[in-house]
Amino acid sequence: MAVLLHHEYGIVPGGSVATLLINHPYTIAIYFAAWRLGARVVPINPGETDERVEYIFTNSESTLLVAHESCRDCYNAIHNAMRLALIPSVLDKPGSNALTLSSL
């Protein structure tokens, strides 16, 4: 996954990856991949107010947003305003290996 983050999404040491994810083992994998590249992870709680989420994104200097599809309302507004790359993830469907981060 670190290779994917680096080659496909341009994450580099010192970069920043914002996340809007649910509690799931793949969340940990995404965090470790970013850390392996030397990037910061900026976890955003999907339950935050729109103003708070916008504040966090604005100040995080993130170049990539990794979001779970259940957080759609929050990430659509951020994505349009912040011009972040969006990777909707299907993480919680039983028996599904269908992730848009397909290089897991």
Image (cartoon, rainbow, N blue to C red):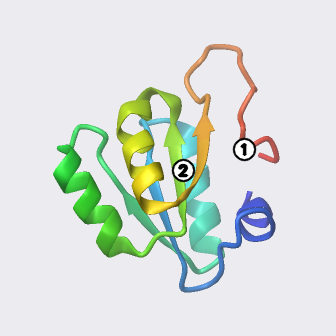
Residue drawn at x 23%, y 63% as measured from the top left: 55
On screen, residue 79 above or below 61 = above
- The quarter holding residue 31 reads bottom right
In contact (CB < 8 Å): disc 1 and disc 2: yes
Q: Badge 1, how many Cα within 10 Å: few under 14, some, many 20+?
A: some
Could you say where residue 100 lies in the image, as x and y percent from the top left?
A: 72, 38
- The quarter holding residue 98 reads top right
Residue drawn at x 59%, y 80% as measured from the top left: 38
Q: Please give left or right for residue 101 compared with residue 88 in the image.
A: right
Count all numbered tags in the image, as a single digit.
2
Residue type highlighted by circle 2: Val
Q: Please give left or right for residue 50 compared with residue 74 in the image.
A: left
Could you say where residue 85 lies in the image, as x and y percent from the top left?
A: 60, 56
- The quarter holding residue 74 reads top left
* Residue for badge 1: 101
Residue type highlighted by circle 1: Leu
Where disc 2 sits, the SS reads: strand
Q: Badge 2, how many Cα within 10 Å: few under 14, some, many 20+?
A: many
Q: Please give left or right for residue 1 compared with residue 11 in the image.
A: right
Q: Please give left or right for residue 102 compared with residue 36 in the image.
A: right
- Camera-side residue of 64 and 2: 64
In the rendered image, which quarter contains the N terminus?
bottom right
What is the CA distance from the residue labelled 1 to the residue labelled 2? 9 Å
Q: Which residue lies furthest to the bottom in this view?
A: 14
Q: Residue 41 carries which label?
A: none
* Residue for badge 2: 66
Where disc 1 sits, the SS reads: loop
Label 1 or label 2, whichever comes before in sequence order: 2
Could you say where residue 30 lies in the image, as x and y percent from the top left?
A: 59, 54
